[in-house]
Image (tube, rainbow, N blue to C red):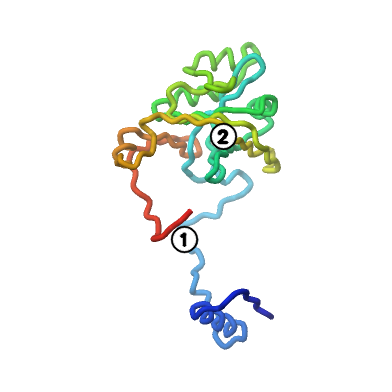
Amino acid sequence: MKVFRYGNINNDHGHYFIVLWFVILGIIPFKSSLMNTLKQDNYILLEPITSIWDQVFTVAPLVVIGTKEKQGYDLAPKHMAMPLGFGNYFGFVCTPRHNTFDNILATGQFTVSFPLPDQIISTSLSASPRTECISKSEGIINSLPILRAPSMDAPIIADAYFYLECELYKIIDGFDDYSIITGRIKAAYAHKDYMKVSEIDEQQQLAKNPLLAYIAPGRFAKISATNGFPFPKNFQR
């Protein structure tokens, strides 16, 4: 067995290099105790027959995707949604079984609304099923507090704290019958109370202006108590 290493070897690297060779040659026994194996006393192996995400609680954002649908509009809440990298891209999980998917294919654009905790009812109602007698646009969208996005013909939830206007970037298929729809952010609007400003105490700012989180599966939370994250020294993203 050969071990190849490129570049200069300093004192620390040389030490690890020699130890690695001693382990390979059997001079120093490999100690698996350097990394202990998970003790399953308090853990249960989840069965993959059903979705593992329905068997444990996780925290996620909760957004509402807005699209143009023929002569009307459509809204759909999503929690499998997130920024894609630190550039101006956003993505969410969807399925061709939902009209949101077809609407975005047809128009090439969508909006994202980040609702506040007290908007949980209207956010939930945006997921109301369609009926044969009346379209979702007529039955639900016209009853909800919505607005038209400033620069595209698509709806947004009124009084949300953060909005995105997105142009379809690409769709990634292959996750069973689900896909990831990605968009390039063309415009973004944030309420002044939720802007990150250096001279404002962030803990007090969020205590006064809480955020909404989705606790999957099937719960939500109002987040007002936060703490600064303990990044390691000299951490860089």
Q: Residues within 10 Å of mark 2 (few under 14, many from 20)?
A: many
Residue drawn at x 62%, y 86% is 25
In the picture, residue 100 is in which quadrant?
top right
Residue drawn at x 33%, y 47% is 227
Three-letter amino acid code of the residue under disc 1? Asp
Residue 185: image tag: 2
Nearest the eye: 59 or 129? 59
**Residue that numbered label 1 is attached to:** 41
Residue drawn at x 67%, y 43% is 175
Left-right relation of 109 to 188? right
Of label 2 and label 1, which has the lower sequence position? 1
- Residue furthest bottom in the image: 27
Kindly report the distance in space between the C-alpha atoms of the residues bearing marks 2 and 1: 46 Å
Residue drawn at x 46%, y 39% is 215
Nearest the eye: 190 or 104? 190
Three-letter amino acid code of the residue under disc 2? Ile
